[in-house]
Structure formats: structure tokens, C-alpha cells
Image (tube, helix red, strand yellow):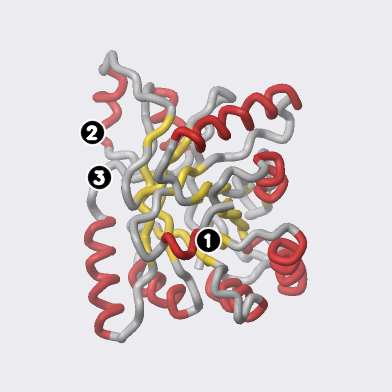
Amino acid sequence: MGRPFREALASTPVVLEIVPPGRRVSEKSVNAFVERVRDSVRSLENLNGVNIPEVLEENHAGQPFYRDLDPRDFAALLGDLGVDPIVNKVVAHVPSEPVLRRWIRESVEDHGFRNFVLVGGNSSRARYPGPSVVEANRILRTLTKGRDDIALGNITIAERDHEVDRLVEKTRAGCDFFTTQVLFEAEPMATVLRAYGRRCSSQNLKPATVLLSFAPVSDYQDIEFLVRSRTGVPRGRTHVVVASPRRCGPIATARSARGEYRGGLGPQLRSRGADGP
């Protein structure tokens, strides 16, 4: 394994996000997908990490349905890629704080993971059993005190009200980096980032690194999926994709950005909903 991902945060990290295959996918298809991921990682010389989200759907009551493989299990299938895996956890659906503490200890001590993205629920109105993201950040930092190789991330959604306040609060709770949803336009993210930088400067707070997310969109099915996933697709952009005869390649990466991977097992791109408080 290469250098700790946390060290890369001081420069211009590039991260490839791989959504785990579905739990009902055949073993043969999963193995083929794993090999494609390994080939993709080997082809990216400047890659600093592989982000593995926990994808779930919520019903009207906010109860989760896990369609895809668990991020820790998928990371184990991928094996040593030469770069750090980044394991995501939707903490809102953890039954209790002791369960979250056990999950963190197992992840760090038993599985050897050292990079995490802690995520909230899809709805700001639902009452979830798990801790808030800020509370989960503090728990992880307490349990990993003295470990300077542990990197902790959260999600930023520029369209939310009071997003700068959220970023500052999560930064104070120990967040090292934020990841965005898939971006199609500079605004409103650019405005949020400038305000976040000013706020951190005025409070003498070191700002967290922000990883900007980009993904290939090659046909109307991609647009339809992104809209269904609550990603902010600009209204005037869908006809451009549908009318274009050109198709994007399978991987899009950028300096200081996350690359989003779309594999042949169907649309692999997901977003994170509202990422509650």
C-alpha cells in the first residue's frame, strides 16, 4: 500500500470512486467487475485513493434498503490496489452509538482501514437512530486519538441552506476533507467554497480539503439516473447530452477532484441524498 491518503490531502489529491456491485449480482460478474476496477486503478498514475460509498435507499419512513455490497466487504474483494481505500458509512442508520464505536474499532483494528467518509441520512425531517455526522466525527476522533494516519471525510451539498455553517461545524469536529456530489456547473459550489475559506480564516481554523466530483454522462439514461438520485442536473443541459453523437469514456478524473467510475454492470454512479445534519 502506498503513502497514507491523509498525506495527499496537503497537495492535490485525485480519488476514484467505485460504487460496489449489487448484492444480487453473480459471483462471476462481481469478479469481472473487480478486475476492471484493478485495471482502472493501475492505469491512473497520479491516483491517491479509491472511495467506496455506502449506497442505500430509504422508504417514506426513512428506513434503509441496502442494494449494494457493504463497502468494507467490497474493499476486501479489491485487495491491495497500491492506494488507500476510503470506506463510507451512513451513520444515521447505525442503531446506536455503541454499535458505531464497535464498527470504527473493527474497521481500524481488525480490517486496517484508515480513511473514512461519514454520511448522514437522506432527509432532514426523518428521525434516525444513529448519531449526527458531527457527533460521529467526534466519536471517531476520540477512538483514533494519536493516529496521525487517519483521514476523516464528510459530504458537502452546496444547495443546502446554511451549508457554510455545516462545513465549519464538521471541520471543528475533526473533518479533514469533504466530497461533493457530482458537479455540472461551478455555482453554487464556488460561492460556498469562497465563503467557507473566509469563515475559516476569520476563525483561525484550518480549512478541510474539498474534493470536487465529476462523472461522465454519455446518454439519457445517465441523466435520468442522476435526476432520480437528487443530483443537481441543470435544466438546460439534458438536451445537449441526448443530442450529442459522442460518448464519454468510462473514467473521468481531474486534478484535485474525485473521478467517478461507471462500470458495465449498469449505472454505478450514486449520490448521497440530503446528508442530514
Spatial distance from mark 1 to mark 3, Cα to Cα? 31 Å
Q: How crowded is mark 2: few (under 14 residues within 10 Å), some or many (20 or more)?
A: few
Residue 112 in the figure: left or right of residue 2: right
Residue 70 in the figure: left or right of residue 265: right
Residue 177 placed where, x, y %?
Answer: 43, 64
Amino acid type for the residue under numbered disc 2:
Gly
Identify the disc placed on residue 236. 2
- Return the residue at label 1: 4
Residue 225 placed where, x, y %?
Answer: 46, 32
Q: Helix, strand or loop at disc 1?
A: loop
Q: For the residues carrying marks 2 and 1, which lies nearer the camera in this image?
A: 1
Residue 38 visible somewhere in the drawing: yes
Residue 202 placed where, x, y %?
Answer: 25, 84
Identify the disc placed on residue 185. 3
Spatial distance from mark 3 to mark 2, Cα to Cα? 11 Å
Q: Earlier in the sequence, mark 3 or mark 2?
A: 3
